[in-house]
């Protein structure tokens, strides 16, 4: 009678890791199971306005009666709560240990900044720590029922965005570019990353458009990749004033984001 071969310590460790990863993915799947549409806002270039687009898009969707959440996945420099002027962090359920997002302007928010003691402190983490932090936030957040979850991704094409793309199974990406050639190039790099992972680009948005920096980058990207141009956001000082996102206080900004959000609703609700 043959006996089963005993696993080596290395094999036991690998098997244990497989089981742990399976449980993590199961918990993440459960936490986002009631979200209808998950949209990443992304670009390879930092500073092009991904967070500005994420927040104002969420506000515009909410103004049209949609239930919306924002997941700020920029672990190094999270800014969603700052733009929303939201200081109240999530509550934690003692029974299931899940975080229940706080809310501002009827938008649920989860961001790493809630766990920073000092918002000016630099987060100096290597890739594996960033990946682990993202996975923990995904596992531990209870979003409830949402029509849209807007995911504000970090820039680049490495650990942070890759973790989200491979874990969250997003329904599509909105690419943000600025008019300058370097911003356009990095937006193209991000599109190529998304395509390599066989995921969908919903469209492209041009930020800082106007006489100061020029315009046209989104049109060129749209033509090159045959993807929709969702809209242009003009360089507007109202984005840096008041205690509300500019789409809630400025008629011109509201109209710009209404065009983008309407295109999103048309795609996913039709």
Image (cartoon, helix red, strand yellow):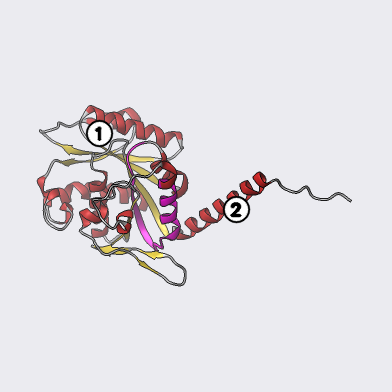
Residue 220 horizontal/vertical position (percent): 26, 28
Residue in view at x 41 percent, y 70 percent = 93
x and y, in percent, of residue 41 in the image: 32, 45
- Magenta segment: does it hold 143? yes
The local secondary structure at tag 1 comes to: helix
Q: Left or right of 166: which side holds 114?
A: left
The image quadrant that residue 178 belongs to is top left
Residue under pointer 2? 19
Magenta-drawn segment = 130-156
Residue at left 25%, top 28%?
Answer: 182
Q: Position of residue 248 (x, y in %)?
A: 16, 56
Q: Nearer the viewer, residue 259 or 19?
A: 19
Q: Can residue 270 be seen in this view?
A: no
Which residue lies most toward the right here? 1
Q: Is mark 2 on a helix, strand or loop?
A: helix
Mark 1 sits on what residue? 218
């Amino acid at each position: 009678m043959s006996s089963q071969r005993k696993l080596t310590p290395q094999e036991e460790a690998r098997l244990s890791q497989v089981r742990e990863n399976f449980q993590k993915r199961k918990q993440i799947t459960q936490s986002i199971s009631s979200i209808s549409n998950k949209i990443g806002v992304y670009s390879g270039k930092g500073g092009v306005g991904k967070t500005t687009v994420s927040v104002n898009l969420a506000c515009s969707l909410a103004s049209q009666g949609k239930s919306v959440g924002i997941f700020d996945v920029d672990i190094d420099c999270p800014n969603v709560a700052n733009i929303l002027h939201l200081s109240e962090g999530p509550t934690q359920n003692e029974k299931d240990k899940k975080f229940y997002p706080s809310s501002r302007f009827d938008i649920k928010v989860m961001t790493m900044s809630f766990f920073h003691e000092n918002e000016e402190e630099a987060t100096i983490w290597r890739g594996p720590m960033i990946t682990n932090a993202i996975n923990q936030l995904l596992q531990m957040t209870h979003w409830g029922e949402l029509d849209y979850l807007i995911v504000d991704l970090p820039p680049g094409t490495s650990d942070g965005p890759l973790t989200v793309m491979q874990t969250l199974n997003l329904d599509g990406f909105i690419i943000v570019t600025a008019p300058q050639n370097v911003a356009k190039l990095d937006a193209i790099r991000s599109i190529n990353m998304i395509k390599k992972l066989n995921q969908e680009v919903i469209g492209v948005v041009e930020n800082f458009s106007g006489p100061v920096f020029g315009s046209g980058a989104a049109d060129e990207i749209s033509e090159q990749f045959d993807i929709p141009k969702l809209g242009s956001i003009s360089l507007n000082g109202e984005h840096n004033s008041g205690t509300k996102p500019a789409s809630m206080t400025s008629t011109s900004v509201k109209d710009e984001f209404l065009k983008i959000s309407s295109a999103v609703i048309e795609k996913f609700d039709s």
